Image (cartoon, rainbow, N blue to C red):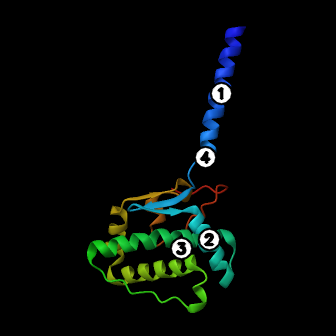
Amino acid sequence: MTRLRGALAALVLAASVLLTGCAQAAPSTTALVGGHVIAESTIDQATQDFLKVADGDWASTRAAVARQYVLGYAARIIAADRGIALTTSKADDKLTKYPQLAELIALGDDLKDIRGAMTDEQLSAALSALDVTLNPRYGTWAAYSDLTASVAPTGSLSEIASS
């Protein structure tokens, strides 16, 4: 009986150590794009900023914001690799108090520049060749980077992302 109590005590101690370690995990990540980490908190803040100046619901706006961040950073990498000049985004003065929103607009402009400089086939090939690690809640990189898709995965844990 003493051995059993000792084994159970060791098991409880090990479980508590493991669970404590989980509680101290780093903030969640939306994606890692060519070494650049896009945090879920960045997406949340950009979504909040966007909804302060425009109408929309949280889930669909957040999905669009996350996709624009990921594809915008991918566009910057492609532009650097191919020598494509990106225009400098000029954010409206009233947006300066929302830095995440200003960055979101700049990323969208960068994606527009890339789409204007490459055919859809070239861009699709360049996107698929990038080193991108996408949070599994958003589905696969191949599906997420499909520029013909009209709706991006929401990132909601209550929805199953299509693969």
Query: Residue 27 location in percent, x, y?
Result: 57, 55
* Residues at marks 2 and 1 touching, judged by CB atoms closer than 8 Å: no
Distance from disc 3 to disc 2, alpha carbons, whole Å, reads 23 Å
Distance from disc 4 to disc 3, alpha carbons, whole Å, reads 37 Å
Sequence-first disc among 4 and 2: 4
Query: Tag 4: residue type?
Result: Gln
Give the residue at x 33% y 68%.
126
Element type where label 2 sits in the image: helix
Report which residue position mark 2 lands on: 45
Residue 150: assigned label: 3
**Closer to us: mark 3 or mark 1?**
1
Which residue is outermost to the top?
A: 1
Give the residue at x 33% y 62%.
129
- Residue situated in front as seen by the camera: 48 or 59: 48
* Residues at marks 4 and 3 touching, judged by CB atoms closer than 8 Å: no
CA neighbours of label 3 inside 10 A, class few (<14), some (14 to 19), many (20+):
few
Report which residue position mark 1 lands on: 13
Sequence-first disc among 4 and 3: 4
* Residues at marks 3 and 2 touching, judged by CB atoms closer than 8 Å: no
Query: Residue 108 location in percent, x, y?
Result: 48, 80
Above/below status of 144 relative to 61? above
Quarter of the figure with the N terminus: top right
**Closer to us: mark 4 or mark 2?**
4
* Residues at marks 4 and 1 touching, judged by CB atoms closer than 8 Å: no
**Closer to us: mark 4 or mark 3?**
4
Distance from disc 3 to disc 1, alpha carbons, whole Å, reads 49 Å
Element type where label 1 sits in the image: helix
Query: Residue 70 location in percent, x, y?
Result: 47, 68
Report which residue position mark 4 lands on: 24
